[in-house]
Image (cartoon, helix red, strand yellow):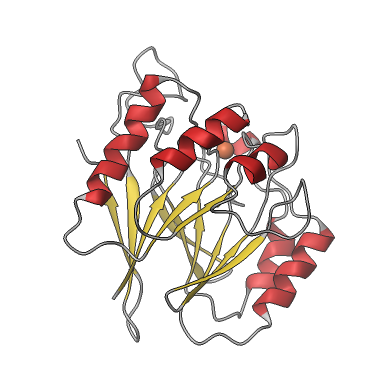
Amino acid sequence: MYIIAHLSDPHLDGSEEARSRLRKLTSYLREFRRPVDVVLVSGDLADHGQESEYAELAAELKLDVPVLVLPGNHDVSAPLRAGLADFVDSAGEGHPVHQLHDVGGARFVLLDTSVPGEDHGLLSAESLAWLDGVLAEPVDGPLFVAFHHPPFELNHPVLDQWLLRSGPELEAVLRGKPITAILAGHVHNGLATTFAELPFLVAPGVRSTPPLPFEPPAPGGGLVDDTTAHPGLALHIYTPGAPLQTLFRHPA
Ligand SMILES: [Fe+2]
Ligand SMILES: [Fe+2]
């Protein structure tokens, strides 16, 4: 059994509120009777992309298990690389921050879908070629591809403006590859669906949970930034020869 604790969108900003929401999840993980194999945080790590916010995250993620991080639209490449140097392994400098990690027999391809200064996501031809090359390498164990922006709409008038705008191109690269699951964040909602005929799993938002328009509205009537919902995470459980299982947890 191989367990991935998948968190997303802590949006650390130096505030006690943001820190305590993330800490609810890290405290929960620290109490595990059998530690998870890896922790993945799928973007919007810092709210303003400042090095001090990344330093804060680095301190919160000292968990005695391997931790992987990738950028979202709120992140800024250079401070992220500097503040999270213990976690990030990416060639080059600046943007994009693509990574390849092998952790305990599982392979993680971490893509940077962010566009500096923009909220939507995009993958350049160079990024797609890098992904295609990495996915051509033989793998023995489970293979996960992770990035921040989902490439499909959620029927949400705000979130749907900020999605990954490279869906067809990405689908062409991913389709038919031996990928166990695709892992994402950004929409601050736990979500299970498929993309390119592969499992596509989105972690709940640590910082907030925007309701869908058909749900009861958030306090104040807004469609984004409901911080009254408990922070959550996904636990992806891989067993060789069996389909991946995902649990969504919202520790009180
Ligand atoms: Fe976010
Ligand atoms: Fe985001």
Vertical placement of residue 40 versus 225, above or below: below
x%, y% of residue 216? 32, 25
User: Residue placed at 60% from the left, 42% from the top?
Assistant: 72
Left or right: 84 as drawn, with respect to 129: left
In this view, the residue farthest toward the left is 33
Residue 9 can be seen in this image: no
User: Residue placed at 64% from the left, 38% from the top?
Assistant: 73
Closest to the observer: 114 or 171?
Answer: 114
In this view, the residue farthest toward the top is 220
Closest to the observer: 165 or 4?
Answer: 4
Vertical placement of residue 45 versus 31, above or below: above
Left or right: 217 as drawn, with respect to 169: left
Vertical placement of residue 217 versus 24, above or below: above
Closest to the observer: 248 or 21?
Answer: 21
Quadrant into which the N terminus falls: bottom left
x%, y% of residue 19? 38, 29
